[in-house]
Amino acid sequence: MAGLRGEVRAVAGTDESLRRSLHELFIRHYDNVSWEVFSADFAEKDFVILLRRAADGAAAGFSTQKVLRGERGGDEARILFSGDTVIDKAAWGEQELVKAWCRLAGAVKSQEPNSPLHWLLICKGYRTYLYLPLFFDEYWPRREAPTPPEEQALIDDFGRWKFGPAYKDGLLRFAAPKGNLTPELAAVPSGRREDPRVKFFLERNPGYAAGDELVCLTEVSDGNMKGLAKRLYRDGYATGLHGLLTG
């Protein structure tokens, strides 16, 4: 599958037909996700990054996003929280989701340029976790250094506020299943297991295949981003949120 195009929409502007098609896409990759749970989670978000096949407009991936407010070191900070995210396996290797997310992050930052913006990412699998070292210099948790107290406090505060007793020691463990990778996608190729960052993820989240999630945090800023991510972030910052949204 090639030729994807990405767009960012306000969740409030999506209809049930689109949401149903995204749920169908999601459950091809994740088990134990009912329509009711998916729909409620989707509705509470602010934005959805939508990937469509250029050939026929069919959905090939998406990621839901919400802007929250927290406190870091006594100062207010904004948090861009990524919720349900999936890319059709046939489209792996495409970069449209990454491009759209970086532009959205820049557009959100431009709304309050003097307020720190963090990305809070909950990782069900190592592939998601590896986006952090690919695009950011500093992120938490990571193998190279212990998480600073202020960042850990932000992770803990969010985890307890949003997930209650399901959150403990940087991980989400739900009493009732809320979605886990299918066995095929949960498998880690033998060669990947030797990657130090993959090993770190597996050590920190040994129950990932059962649906446990590692809560991660990084600052979204020009100084902390690198490569393509930084260029796209700057593009989104210049465009602004109003210019970025479609639909």
Image: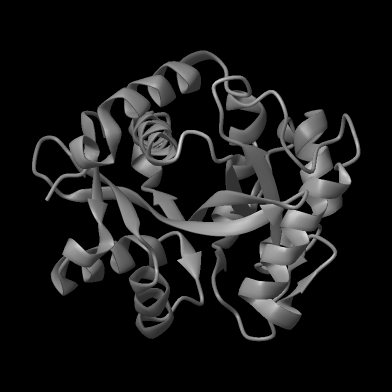
* Vertical comparison of 204 with 174: above or below: above
Q: Residue at x 81, y 58 (%)?
A: 206
- Give the left or right position of residue 64, taking residue 198 as reference: left
- The mark tally for this picture is 0
* Coloring scheme used: one colour
- Give the left or right position of residue 185, taking residue 191 as reference: left
Q: Nearer the viewer, residue 156 or 99?
A: 156
- Give the left or right position of residue 218, taking residue 113 as reference: right
Task: Give residue 23's position: percent from left, percent from top.
Answer: 32, 68
- Examine the rendering and report whether any part of residue 124 can be seen: no
Q: Residue at x 37, y 84 (%)?
A: 36
Quarter holding residue 198: top right
Residue farthest to the right? Answer: 146
Task: Give residue 98's position: percent from left, percent from top.
Answer: 42, 33
Q: Residue at x 81, y 52 (%)?
A: 152
Task: Give residue 143's position: percent from left, percent from top.
Answer: 86, 35
Quarter holding residue 21: bottom left
- Give the left or right position of residue 52, taking residue 38 as reference: left
Q: Residue at x 57, y 44 (%)?
A: 119
* Vertical comparison of 78 with 2: above or below: below
Task: Give residue 170's position: percent from left, percent from top.
Answer: 79, 60
- Examine the rendering and report whether any part of residue 105 can be seen: yes
Q: Quadrant of the N terminus?
A: top left
* Vertical comparison of 31 with 139: above or below: below
Quarter holding residue 11: bottom left
